[in-house]
Image: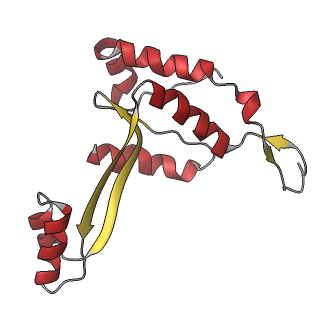
Amino acid sequence: MKIVETYSHLNGLEFLHYHKPELWKEVKKVITDIDGEACKTKVSKEKTMKGKLLYSPIDMNKAFKEKLECLNWNESRVSYWVTGDERLIRKTLPMSPENQKKEIEESGAKPIFSYNQTDFVKDRVAIEVQFGKYSFVAYDLFVKHLAF
């Protein structure tokens, strides 16, 4: 694969170039080492392309996972409990998930389990791998960015 375009959200690319050049070098190497043609395993069911081989998001994600994990990039997942009461959420935010749930239940509110997941993190740099689900790009940039 190759990098054709970049988008530097909040000057993130410039930050990598200046502060974390070794991580940017790793990311570029992972991308160039992935054989995109080997990931063309999805058979189209669309009327206009029926039977055509397409890039499989599952296989592409798997290729990225294998290569990035070898370089110690790992998933980050933070679990927490929320409820409809904003003041209660603000109170429970700094607590452990177990204590959040207990505090919410003791207040008489219903605890709702949630989590924030980032595909790969290393040295406080996050990577989200996204193929085809363009509607989630804004979510990844704004919601996860704020939590990271």
- Quadrant for residue 126, please give it: top left
Q: Is residue 116 above or below residue 10?
A: below
Relative to 104, is 119 on the left or the right?
right
Quarter containing the C terminus: top left
Relative to 93, is 124 on the left or the right?
right
Q: Is residue 18 above or below residue 9?
A: above
Q: Position of residue 32 (x, y in %)?
A: 61, 18
Q: Is residue 1 above or below residue 83?
A: above
Q: Position of residue 5 (x, y in %)?
A: 57, 24
Relative to 110, is 69 on the left or the right?
right
Q: Residue at x 52, y 25 (%)?
A: 6
Can residue 3 be seen in the rendering of this structure? Answer: no
Q: Position of residue 79 (x, y in %)?
A: 29, 58
Quarter containing the N terminus: top right
Q: Residue at x 11, y 71 (%)?
A: 87
Q: Residue at x 48, y 22 (%)?
A: 27
